[in-house]
């Protein structure tokens, strides 16, 4: 399968490496940053410099490929998807942006190729897991989805390190969030809905952020009383972010906020991804609750040290692409994450990165997995 990866940043680089190492994919990376492309070239991965904002140039560049994987920031998603449609190639991305996803859905109407956005961790895997749990109930009362990409060793006041796109992070802190309350889909405000919980003896907070539900509100509409998604952080993070966005009015000056974050908040490869899903409802005449949790730590994959967010985000994209290649997913039109079987995902060679049983690992496995069904 010939795959064009547009965007050679951290996640795009990881996807290219993972796919190439299987021997089942012919990969070419596209970006306008020569330094990013040079890193991939040094690993023997073919690259091509292109202005990814130029839809016509991108359309011409990806002619003849089977699929396009978009690893660019959310605000370029629609432009890249339009180029994929014009070139007649299947489209996959990692966007968390609700408006971009809706626009891509419109592009997919009547398309002979597949359009599958939101193929990362959240949205992405979290929706696959939540949908699987929800389907075990005859009546669904409540679905709670919680995900955090956190430093394993927090040291600054934010108790946070940059582990992925700053653009995406700020966008999910600023945009309205979908939720279902009393059986009705509605919009709730980001940073609201603060709650606290503990897991494995560690205290966390969680609050509303945008995009993590993907298309699950629509899929479960009429079947669930309450459904929401919240990002997990260490206690105190949300108050400081709220100060920056509201008190200092940086929500309306995102460029300044991005500059501050990049200058002041270090990145880390020593991170942990926390996944926590609870579903409550009726089964066989009894009120029961199912819980699905994962803690995924940084480790070595295919001989390369990777952060937990690299593993989970790139791993999810590669797993979905693998399932698509195996024709276990629809081959045309708009494809939702919840159309992916959790069993198929976790049984996939890349999906096993979420489960701790993969031969891709080198060295000791530190992932802890608990599933109550």
Image (tube, rainbow, N blue to C red):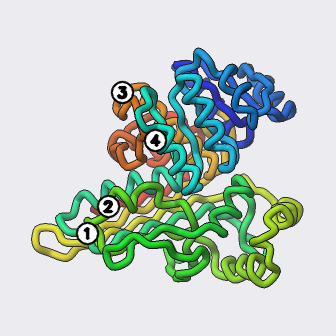
Q: Determine crowd level at label 4: few under 14, some 14-19, many 20+ residues with C-alpha closer than 10 A.
A: many
Q: Mark 4 points at which residue?
A: 351
Dot 1 or dot 4: first in sequence order is 1
Q: Label 3, on which residue?
A: 327
Q: In the rendered image, is residue 69 in sight?
A: yes
Callout 3: few (<14), some (14-19), or many (20+) C-alpha neighbours within 10 Å?
few
Q: Relative to residue 220, is residue 354 depicted above or below?
A: above
Secondary structure type for disc 1? strand
Which of the pair 21/177 is nearer the observer? 177
Vertical relation: 22 (above or below) 242: above
Labelled pair 1, 2 in contact (Cβ < 8 Å):
yes
Q: How far apart are marks 1 and 2 (CA)?
A: 9 Å
Q: Is mark 4 on a helix, strand or loop?
A: helix
Indicate the position of residue 102 as horizontal and vertical percent values.
Answer: 51, 51
Closer mark to the observer between disc 4 and disc 2? 2
Q: Which residue is labeled 2 in the image?
A: 220
Query: What residue appears at the point 53 percent right and 62 percent down from the top-left corner?
Result: 274
Contact, mark 3 vs mark 4 (Cβ under 8 Å): no
Badge nearest the viewer, 1 or 2: 2
Image location (x, y in percent) of residue 364: 57, 46
Q: How far apart, in angstroms, are the residues tagged by discs 2 and 3?
A: 25 Å
Horizontal relation, residue 11 to residue 133: left or right: right
Compute the Cα span from label 1 to label 3: 30 Å
Judge depth for marks 1 and 4 and give the one in front.
1
Q: Is residue 254 above or below residue 236?
A: above
* Sequence-first disc among 4 and 2: 2
Give me the residue at 66% from left, 78% from top. 238
Marks 4 and 2 sit apart, C-alpha to C-alpha, by: 24 Å
In the displayed structure image, the side of residue 252 where residue 336 appears, left or right: left
Mark closer to the chain start, 1 or 3: 1
Q: Which of marks 1 and 2 is nearer the N terminus?
A: 1
CB atoms of marks 1 and 4 within 8 Å: no
């Amino acid at each position: 399968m010939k795959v064009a990866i547009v965007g050679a940043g951290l996640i795009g680089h990881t996807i290219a490496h993972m796919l190439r190492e299987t021997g089942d994919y012919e990969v070419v990376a596209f970006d306008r940053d020569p330094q990013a492309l040079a890193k991939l070239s040094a690993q023997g991965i073919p690259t091509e410099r292109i202005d990814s904002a130029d839809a016509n140039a991108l359309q011409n560049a990806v002619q003849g490929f089977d699929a396009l994987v978009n690893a660019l920031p959310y605000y370029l998603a629609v432009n890249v998807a339009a180029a994929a449609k014009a070139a007649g190639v299947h489209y996959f991305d990692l966007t968390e942006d609700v408006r971009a996803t809706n626009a891509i859905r419109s592009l997919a109407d009547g398309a002979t190729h597949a359009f599958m956005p939101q193929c990362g961790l959240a949205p992405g895997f979290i929706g696959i897991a939540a949908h699987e749990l929800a389907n075990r109930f005859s009546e669904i009362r409540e679905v709670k989805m919680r995900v955090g990409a956190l430093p394993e060793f927090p040291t600054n006041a934010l108790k946070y390190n940059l582990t992925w796109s700053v653009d995406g992070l700020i966008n999910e802190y600023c945009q309205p969030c979908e939720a279902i309350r009393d059986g009705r889909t509605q919009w709730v405000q980001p940073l609201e809905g603060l709650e606290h919980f503990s897991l494995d003896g560690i205290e966390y907070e969680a609050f509303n952020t945008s995009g993590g539900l993907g298309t699950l509100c629509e899929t479960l509409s009429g079947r669930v009383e309450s459904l929401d998604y919240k990002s997990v952080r260490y206690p105190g993070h949300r108050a400081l972010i709220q100060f920056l966005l509201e008190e200092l009015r940086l929500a309306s000056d995102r460029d300044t906020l991005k500059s501050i974050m990049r200058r002041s908040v270090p990145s880390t490869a020593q991170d942990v991804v926390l996944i926590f899903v609870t579903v409550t409802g009726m089964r066989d005449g009894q009120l029961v609750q199912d819980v699905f949790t994962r803690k995924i730590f940084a480790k070595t994959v295919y001989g390369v040290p990777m952060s937990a967010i690299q593993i989970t985000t790139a791993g999810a994209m590669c797993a979905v692409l693998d399932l698509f290649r195996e024709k276990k997913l629809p081959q045309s039109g708009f494809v939702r994450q919840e159309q992916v079987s959790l069993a198929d995902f976790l049984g996939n060679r890349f999906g096993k990165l979420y489960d701790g049983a993969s031969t891709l690992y080198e060295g000791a496995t530190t992932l802890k997995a608990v599933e109550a069904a």
